[in-house]
Amino acid sequence: MVNSIFEYGDVWKEDRGAMAPGKLKLTDQNIVFKNAKTGKVDQINNGEVESVFWQRLAGAYGLRIQTKNPSLYRFGGFQNDERGKLREFFKEFYNLDMKTKEFSLTGRNWGTVNFDPVVLSFDIDKVPAFEIPLAYVSNCSTSKNEVTLEFQPNDDAPSCMMEMRFYVPTDPNPDVDAVEAFKANVMSRAGITQATGDAIANFNGVQCLTPRGRYDIKIFTTFI
């Protein structure tokens, strides 16, 4: 008989690079995570779950849950012997096959970028090397064959990745602008910050070395 309730008191949720500790409860009705520091509760109802994967996550094992709306949740801190029990749980009560997501460990820095509704996946020989949740992206800019992603900092994280750049080769089809296509895919899925209110200061036509070009800079109270 498959258990209909699993409770974990020492797990964490990944949030923009920070590992927020808390308690996770999985039932046949929903999945609930309560942040131990803030008390914030995340609830995912049974019918909202699109897919579930088991994967390595920050030195341990974790659940990667994607919802239909779509959103991405990653919970870590599991032991590997939980995998079989959780696979049976999701099969029985959520009618989902919990597959194992493997990642490439070759260390290569060239590959193929693929987009799904919630992440940018950088794949090497069709195996993902890393994923970027696109809701974490605050800005996307281009310059010649380069695309730059900027990320919102998380004050709770000990260190944050602020920027990542991709070199995008020219498409052999002259009618396709590969750089702009990359940017369009990011912008359509990302949580881009919209500037509202009045800027504290404006600088027009500032010459920048990286990314190269002239840009207008607006400074607001909490971001640029």
Image (tube, rainbow, N blue to C red):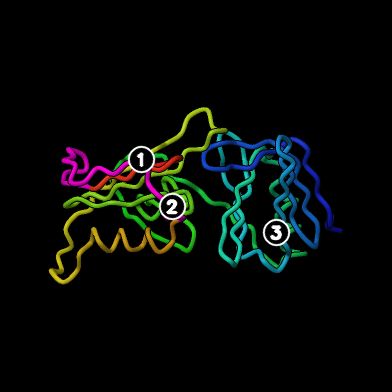
Q: Quadrant of the C terminus?
A: top left
What distance separates the C-alpha of mark 3 from that of mark 1? 30 Å
Q: Which residues are magenta?
A: 191-215
Q: Quadrant of the N terminus?
A: bottom right
Q: Is residue 174 left or right of residue 202?
A: left
What distance separates the C-alpha of mark 3 from that of mark 2? 34 Å
Q: Nearer the viewer, residue 213 or 162?
A: 213
For numbered disc 3, what is the local secondary structure?
A: strand
Q: Which residue does the numbered mark 3 point to in the structure image?
A: 44
- Give above or below for 57 relative to 100: above
Q: Is residue 84 left or right of residue 71?
A: right
Residue type, numbered disc 1: Glu
Instruction: Please tell me whether residue 194 belongs to the stretch shown in magenta.
Output: yes
- Give above or below for 163 relative to 170: above
To which quarter of the image does residue 29 belong? bottom right
Q: Which residue does the numbered mark 2 point to in the structure image?
A: 197
Q: Which residue does the numbered mark 1 point to in the structure image?
A: 163
Q: How many numbered circles are shown? A: 3
